[in-house]
Amino acid sequence: MEVLFNDLKKLHQSIPELNEVIQRTVSDFNFIRGKQVTQFEESFKAVLGVNHCVTTGNGTDALFIALRSLGINPGDEVITPAFSWISSSETISLCGAKPVFADVDSQTYTLDPDRIEEKITDRTKAIVAVHLYGQAAHLEILKKICDKHHLFLIEDCAQGHLTLEYGKYAGTVGEIGAFSFYPTKNLGAYGDAGCIVTNSDTLAEKARRFANHGALLKDDHLVEGMNSRMDTLQAAVLLAKLPHLKRWNEMRNLNAQLYDQLLDGIAEIILPLQRPDASHTFHLYVIRAQQRDELKRWLANYGIQTLVHYPQALPDLPAYHYLGHDKGAFPVAGMLAKEVLSLPVHPLLHLDAIQYVADRIRGFYKK
Ligand SMILES: *Cc1c(COP(=O)(O)O)cnc(C)c1O
């Protein structure tokens, strides 16, 4: 059997109107920020129950625009997890500020709230919390830390579309939430796309201006900005897919539950934590195994695609050698980099495939 990590072809084919939507949008010749873009902004903010949604060219830009709108400048420090995708730290550097890595929690893999205060200096301006794999990022505690030290909280929601924590959606607790609609995310476009969400009128206006060359209206360049806007075609695709997002997340959750049952009791692996007070999007279903690389190869031999998110802690990447961290300075991040393995969990995965993957994992440990 062949088990693909993602099956976007099948997912797109499961929405019969999608091709027609694409055809219609293409023949409208309204390339960037057409009416579908506004419609998507309205729909997405309604789903999250937030005041503003400002679309961007991709999720990395969304984070950068969030930081810029909050006034993160050279000389500032921003705390960000030592274990994430590089966007959560490179956008801090793009502002001229310094990414200050903090280790993650060994159970949730999101920022460890107990490791934050030791990183705060008088230059610290903000914390970037990442809802890694779709797990909620301890927002209630992080928000308290931010309030106490007068810091901004930015949420990287690229993997947390509709993650709930204490009844609040990811992206709606901090000053700004940044989303990616990269094709493989739980809500994905047909190319690059992203957005920020916020309840603040001022921040929304700043973000909208900055993302469009510093101008809200044509030729009204109050400041310099950048070009990061959503294509009309991407918005049309997202509008067609948005009504399915909740159901797709539920299907991912059912797949995760099935893995939990079928992999239960294998002493050598650690299954993802399901917090009772938060929901999980299962953007990724990530197990931990000390023999990760061997297990990955074993599964590949049986036609099972798995991925590693991520093989290195961010501070260990060559890009951050200049910060001079000792190897081992972030023990949890370092351990995760060696042990994590993402199993296929996409919404249209067959139960047979999950059974097959689980059987092959059991087989690996019985060999
Ligand atoms: C995907 C991702 C991003 C960046 O999104 P792009 O749209 O690819 O730029 C940022 N942070 C995390 C955690 C991601 O997974």
Image (cartoon, rainbow, N blue to C red):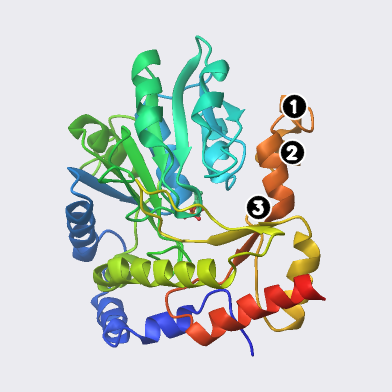
| Residue behind label 1 places its C-beta within 8 angstroms of ligand 1 | no
User: Gap between marks 3 and 2, in whole Å?
Assistant: 11 Å
Mark number, residue 250: none
| In this rendering, position of residue 149 left or right of residue 306 | left
Q: Residues within 10 Å of mark 3 (few under 14, many from 20)?
A: some
Please give the residue where the numbered disc 3 appears in the rendered image: 310
Say whether marks 2 and 1 touch (CB < 8 Å). yes
- Residue position for label 1: 325
- Percent x, y of residue 196: 33, 45
Residue drawn at x 30%, y 82% as measured from the top left: 18
Q: Residue at x 45, y 37 (%)?
A: 129
Callout 3–callout 1 Cβ contact below 8 Å: no
State which quarter of the image contains the C terminus: bottom right
> In the picture shown, does residue 213 fall above or below 34?
above
Whichever of labels 3 and 1 marks the residue nearer the N terminus, that label is: 3
Which numbered circle lies on residue 316?
2
Which residue is more in the foreground, 174 or 233?
Answer: 174
Q: Nearer the viewer, residue 350 or 47?
A: 350
Q: Is residue 27 above or below residue 122?
A: below
Front residue of this view, candidates 164 and 257: 257
Residue 138 at what x, y percent from top left?
42, 37
Real-space Cα separation, disc 3 to disc 1, in angstroms: 18 Å
- Looking at the image, residue 135 lies above or below residue 173: below
Q: Quadrant of the N terminus?
A: bottom right
Identified by mark 1, the residue type is: His
> Residue 27: which quarter of the image?
bottom left
